[in-house]
Image (cartoon, helix red, strand yellow):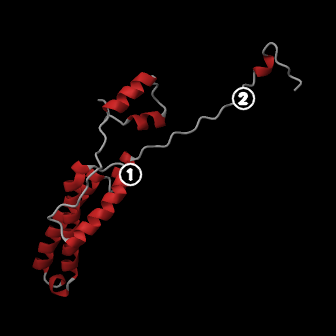
Amino acid sequence: MAGARQPIEVILANGKKHLTKDEITARKNTEVKPIMDDIVAPDYLTKKQKEEFRKLSEQLIKLKIMGETDVDALARYIVANGFYINAVKQMRKPENKNDPFRLEKWAKIQERYFKQARSSANDLGLSISSRCRLVVPEAVPSTTVENKFKRFEKGVDTNE
């Protein structure tokens, strides 16, 4: 079974596949690039959530992995993460710590929002493992190696 289609930059950086210039140009022209013109936080986010949205979206734009179509995915992550943090705070309260039924209720809520936040984070490249799949390796510059048989060529002066 074939793996997921990789961007041409990844293929070239890995250096394992030999493509002609025409094939490289064709692949570059057919690849989908994110549109980063008008990324604005959705209206349903609170003021604090919008600030977090701006901060994260700026970082994702610098990595060139977020586009306008990812706005709602990032907003869902921020909402789920906020509810997760709230559930953790509720679990730490003494009245909830001492009541096993209330603690269990908050633990279920925490688990639900943790799963939602983790899923959204993986989709956006916000986790370490998902970012490793998105990182384009840098091409290793080829070093020119001196030909050790050059001195045997005809007409080459070896006394230099």
Q: Quadrant of residue 102?
A: bottom left
Residue 119 screen position, x and y as percent? 23, 55
Q: Who's the residue at 23% across and 58% down the image?
A: 40
Q: Quadrant of residue 113?
A: bottom left
Is 90 above or below relative to 8?
Answer: below
Q: Is residue 4 left or right of residue 143?
A: left
Which tag is nearer the camera, tag 2 or tag 1?
A: 1
| Total tally of numbered discs in the picture | 2
Q: Nearer the viewer, residue 92 or 15?
A: 15
Q: In the rendered structure, which amino acid carries the disc numbered 2?
A: Glu
Tell me the element at label 2.
loop
Q: Who's the residue at 17% across and 71% down the image?
A: 107
For the N terminus, the quadrant is top left
User: What residue is shown with label 2?
Assistant: 146
User: What residue is shown with label 1?
Assistant: 63
Q: Is residue 127 left or right of residue 90?
A: right
Q: In the rendered structure, which amino acid carries the disc numbered 1?
A: Leu
For the C terminus, the quadrant is top right
Q: Is residue 116 left or right of residue 62?
A: left
Whether pointer 2 and pointer 1 mark residues with C-beta atoms closer than 8 Å, the reply is no
Q: Nearer the viewer, residue 79 or 43?
A: 43
Judge the density around disc 2: few (<14), some (14-19), many (≥20) Cα neighbours within 10 Å: few
Q: Nearer the viewer, residue 26 or 73?
A: 26
Q: Residue furthest bottom?
A: 94
Residue 30 screen position, x and y as percent? 31, 31
Judge the density around disc 1: few (<14), some (14-19), many (≥20) Cα neighbours within 10 Å: few
Q: Who's the residue at 34% across and 31% down the image?
A: 29
Tell me the element at label 1.
loop
Q: Residue furthest front?
A: 37
Residue 53, disc? none
